[in-house]
Image: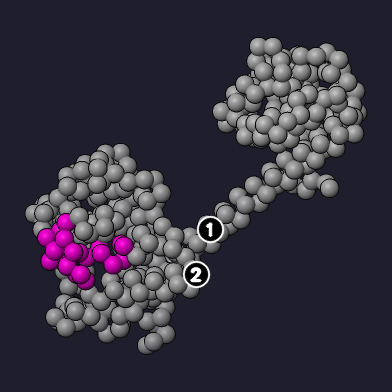
Amino acid sequence: MTADAGYPINRSVLIVDDDATNLKALQEILGKSYKVYPAPNGDRALLFLEKTIPGLILLDVKMPGLNGYDMIKILKQNPRLRDIPVIFLTAQESRDKEEQAFQLGAVDYILKPISAGVVQKRVQLHLELQSYRKNLEELVTVRTNQLQKTQDTILEILANLTAYRDNETGCHLQRTTWYARRLVDCLREKGRMAYRISGSYAENIVKSAKLHDIGKVAISDGILLKPGPLTPDEFAVIKTHTTLGARIIDHAMKELGDDSDFLLVAKEIVYTHHEWWNGAGYPRGLAGGKIPLSGRLMAIADVYDALSSERPYKKSYSHEKALEIMWAEAGTHLDPHLMELAKDVLSGFDDAVYAYKEEPDYIDTLYREALTRAR
């Protein structure tokens, strides 16, 4: 068995034994194949480990002062040292001692008196196993990063598809995602009780923010692209983008067999970002804390962008006027507690208005090209 070239074997061995005869014998057995570091006791070994990480440790169990069991406990509590394979050296052969060795984290144990062949084979085996484990960890990391990149790319494609269908929104998705990022950062810093969120939940909200209007891909062009106010019947159709979007994500979850936190949060946002704090929203008329926090947060981002952006049927409000309207709707439309927590963040929302201006981008260019061909 040989280690993969991607992660070479660390061919160094630290031997910890208070018996000078054993130290010398082990040095002679391993010295031709490995770089050997002898230590006469646990304290000297720990001093050595402050500067150097060996590929493996041969550790005597019975030593004066810091014995082998005490030393391995110290090693396993240290993130820098905990992954070094430890093989115990012991003259005690019993089932209890064997179990104790493995419970403490040893990978193997060798009985005294020492057999040169046994030592060589055990050391070789565990150094190679350690190398393979490192290779596997690196491979998993690479594959995980590749998968994450693929997921993020697909997410971006889906978000762009929504923007492509609804050309009036322009940089709406970029801005609302920016607002969502600032809001979750605020909750991570200030959130208490029902408003306290984990880092993973916060990141899932930010990623999902781009999908909040994905249901609009199923709305007909005649309604979605209408250059003016909608009739009550048309608005009723537009409102179905929440349920349509939730169904799209449900379908994806069934196809992928995936109940990941990310997709669950995405569904929450898609389905509930138009619910109102007082229960007057849609699609289910949820109220107060029954609306998922992700949906309440997205509502704030979405409402601010709707107020501060120009549409064919309305002018944009100033930053100050948009906030004035939002504060008037705190407790009816918007979560008043979330608004209060994010008060300082809201005051800086106009930064995104300038950062993501309605200028032609990739999606806008595609849309204009499609219009040109249609004519």
Secondary structure under the numbered disc 1 in the rendered image: helix
Provide the residue designation for mark 1. 149
Which three-letter amino acid code belongs to the residue tagged 1? Lys
Q: How many marks can you see? A: 2
Q: Relative to 175, does residue 68 appear above or below in the rendering?
A: above
State the residue lying farthest toward the bottom. Answer: 375
Name which residue lies at 19% across and 82% down.
Answer: 234
Q: Is residue 49 left or right of residue 121?
A: left
Tell me the distance, in whole angstroms, between the alpha carbons under discs 2 and 1. 17 Å
Q: Where does the C terminus fall, quadrant-wise?
A: bottom left
Q: Is residue 23 left or right of residue 275?
A: right
Q: Position of residue 161 (x, y in %)?
A: 40, 72
Q: Residues within 10 Å of mark 1 (few under 14, many from 20)?
A: few
Provide the residue designation for mark 2. 256
Q: Position of residue 203 (x, y in %)?
A: 39, 51
Which three-letter amino acid code belongs to the residue tagged 2? Leu
Q: Relative to 189, does residue 34 appear above or below in the rendering?
A: above
Q: How is the image coloured?
A: one colour
Q: Residue 228 appears in which quarter of the rendering?
A: bottom left
Name which residue lies at 24% across and 42% down.
Answer: 193
- Asked whether residue 105 appears in the rendered view, the answer is no
Q: Relative to 6, does residue 48 appear above or below in the rendering?
A: above
Foreground label between 2 and 1: 2
Foreground of the two, 141 or 213 = 141
Q: Relative to 93, does residue 4 appear above or below in the rendering?
A: below
The part of the chain drawn in magenta is: 268-288
The magenta stretch spans residue 279: yes
